Image (cartoon, grey):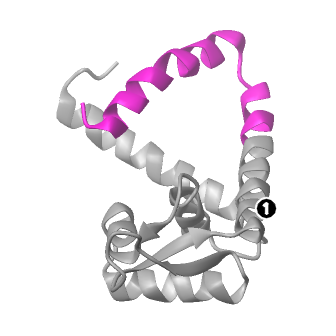
Amino acid sequence: MRSDPRELAEGFSLVLRDLVLLLRQVTAEQPVSAQQLGILGSLEAGPRRVTELAREHGVRAPTMTAHVSRLEEVEAVCRGVDTDDARVVTVGLTSRGRDLLAAGRAARTAFLAERLEALGESERAALAAALPVLSRICAGG
């Protein structure tokens, strides 16, 4: 097992890439893209500024604006005004957006559950044990 941080990071990055691509395939038939499902997930806790969403998703504001426009076309999001600054436009989740997000998550969960069933008990236990570590990585350490 690799314990060198650079080697582990390289291996982790490659596996993560494959997993992301696999999950994108699962939701390819959804009315919104995998990236857009991610945006819907970011809005689940409440409305956000486009600039905040762009920063979180690692894209420029014009790219995020295009995603938001497409999500608006399918009635998954709506634009609003920031309560603290009326000049600032926010993006919020609609009930249709919540439904799309739930459907995307359900498809991913079903797919992963099927894959996880094929693993042995010790492999599933190892994955379960790794989840807190992965969450810590996401939280920044």
Residue name at image x 46 percent, y 44 percent: 15
* Magenta residues, start to end: 112-141
Identify the secondary structure beneath mark 1: helix
- Residue 40 location, x and y as percent? 59, 64
Q: Amino acid at mark 1?
A: Asp
- Residue 90 location, x and y as percent? 45, 75
Residue name at image x 69 percent, y 70 percent: 94
**Between 115 and 56, the one nearer to me in the picture:** 56
Asked if residue 85 lies left or right of residue 134, the reply is left
Residue receiving disc 1: 99
- Give the quarter of the figure containing the N terminus: top left
- Give the quarter of the figure containing the C terminus: top left
Asked if residue 130 lies left or right of residue 118, the reply is left
Residue name at image x 54 percent, y 69 percent: 35
Magenta stretch: includes residue 135: yes
Q: Is residue 116 above or below residue 77?
A: above
Q: Is residue 84 above or below residue 74?
A: above
Magenta stretch: includes residue 14: no
- Residue 120 location, x and y as percent? 71, 16
